[in-house]
Image: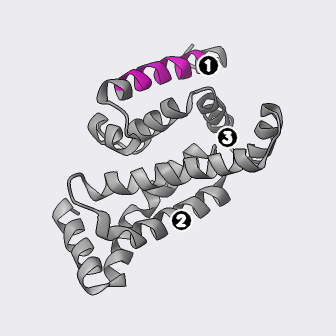
Amino acid sequence: MSKAEDLLWISQVVIADDRRAFDRLVCKYQSSVRRFLLNLTAGDSMLSDDLAQETFIKAYLNIRSFQGISAFSTWLFRIAYNVFYDSKRAQKHYEEINSSEIDKKSSVKIDFSTEKSDIYTALKTLKREEKAVILLCYMEDKTHKEIARITNLPLGTVKTHILKGKEKLNQFLSAQGYGK
């Protein structure tokens, strides 16, 4: 499935309000968007599904603003990234509680393997930008340039966040007994 095919579907949505064409875009990208959001939410599948739905609604409502300068997936991940951080800002606005209570509230009781749980815990040690670029790079196979467009960060900053994020993850996971 190529960029040309995406552009064809987008033009069908814009010109003829063809919802089946948008459905094809949703089917193509929903797994990767949901996975990205699931990792950002530390495994909270209900929240990540809600955020994915909001992402696709915003994409549909704003599809006429897509200019085709970057890939549709880059534009879509930018929306998902913004939706996630908008939800975090809204949560902070309405909840005046300390960080340990936030950690308790955001932890998800799911039967994960120990390794998966340790990875989610390790991701929590990263700064917000580091976490986003690590997930986009290693989970979603985005290039550094695509990540820069998605996060609206300079390319050099993206590379630095990836390097520092990897170092922090390595330190945390080494302390947990991985890699020995």
Tell me which residue sits at (61%, 63%) in the image: 50
Q: Position of residue 54 (x, y in %)?
A: 53, 65
Query: In the picture provided, is 162 more to the left or to the right than 145?
Result: right
- Quadrant of the rendered structure where residue 14 is? bottom left
Magenta part of the protein: which range? 159-171
Residue for badge 1: 172
From mark 1 to mark 3, how far is it between C-alphas? Answer: 17 Å
Q: Which residue is mark 3?
A: 113
Return the x and y of residue 65 as percentages of the image width and height: 30, 64
In percent of the image, x 62 and y 28: which residue is there? 122
Q: Marks 2 and 3, Cα distance to the nearest angstrom?
A: 29 Å
Q: Position of residue 59 (x, y in %)?
A: 41, 66
Eyeballing the image, is 115 above or below 166?
below
Image quarter of residue 112: top right
Single out the mark in the foreground, 1 or 3. 1
Q: Secondary structure at mark 2?
A: helix
Identify residue type, mark 3.
Ser
Q: What number is the disc on residue 54?
A: 2
First in sequence: mark 2 vs mark 3: 2
Find the residue positioned furthest to the front.
93
